Image: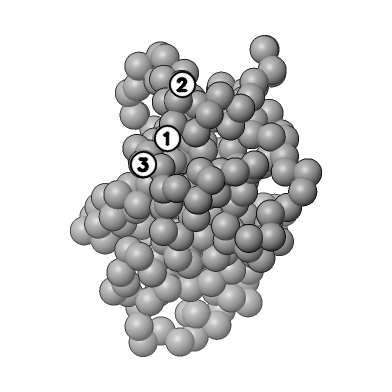
Amino acid sequence: MRVLLVEDDPLIGEAVRVGLARLGITIDWVRDGELGLQCARSEPFDAVVLDLGLPKRDGMQVLRDLRGGGHLMPILVVTARDALSDRVAGLDAGANDYILKPFEMDELAARLRSAIRSRSGRADPVLRSGDVVLHPDTKMVTKNGTAVSLSAREFALLELLMRRPGMPMSRAQLEERLLGWGEEVASNALEVNIHNLRRKLGMGCILNIRGVGYFVPRDEQPCSH
Ligand code: CA
């Protein structure tokens, strides 16, 4: 999951960045509304966390501009506890949800997942592909019912693929969604993560079409257990 954070408060911003990274969520952080609008328009984020009091362009204006321009990504508005009118205005302007300061990272992550889920029309928070089951909320992956230990990056990659079963994503698309700006990784990092996932979950868990991309097989028969 790759999330854009638009927040000018350095303490809150840093806490969110570190807190969500720990939960396996990639955060790109900008500190004013103008830049926030630009980035949200031009890059494929799964969701936006938007503060309302921002320099250069007010958060509410960013929200209106995005919705007015047809951008439908989930947007969570961050507001102060006493600003009821802000919350109402935010929801009216197209925010999916709001969160009150101060907040816990677990709550923010849960609300992000919920907003993304309802956006994609998915009621079941558990993702399945064959005998592999991924629980986005608890960060657990099982194969044939047995828990498998993954690194944060491996988990993020697998979750990304499992949210779009049967749809190949190119290396560039995967890297774009998994890496934050300025993050340096070895050029073969993606291949290493794929290799590790296949080693842990079985060769067939991630397929690739040469020159097109990687994908997980689509489940023909949804599991009932
Ligand atoms: Ca602010």
Q: Farthest right residue?
A: 220
SS under mark 2: helix
Q: Name the amino acid type tagged 3.
A: Ser
Q: Does the residue labelled 3 lie within 8 Å of ligand 1?
A: no
Instruction: Please say whether residue 17 is visible from this viewpoint.
Output: no
Query: Residue 44 placed where, x, y %?
Result: 58, 40
The residue at 35%/52% (across/down) is 23
Is residue 82 depicted above or below 95 in this figure? Answer: below
Is residue 117 depicted above or below 40 in this figure? Answer: below
Do the residues bearing badges 2 and 3 touch, measured as CB atoms within 8 Å? no
> Is residue 223 toward the left or the right of residue 56 in the image?
right
Query: Residue 113 placed where, x, y %?
Result: 51, 60
The residue at 64%/34% (across/down) is 216
> Mark 3 highlights which residue?
149
SS under mark 3: loop
> Mark 1 highlights which residue?
154
Q: Name the amino acid type tagged 2.
A: His
- Which of the numbered marks, if any, corresponds to residue 195? 2
The residue at 50%/26% (across/down) is 198
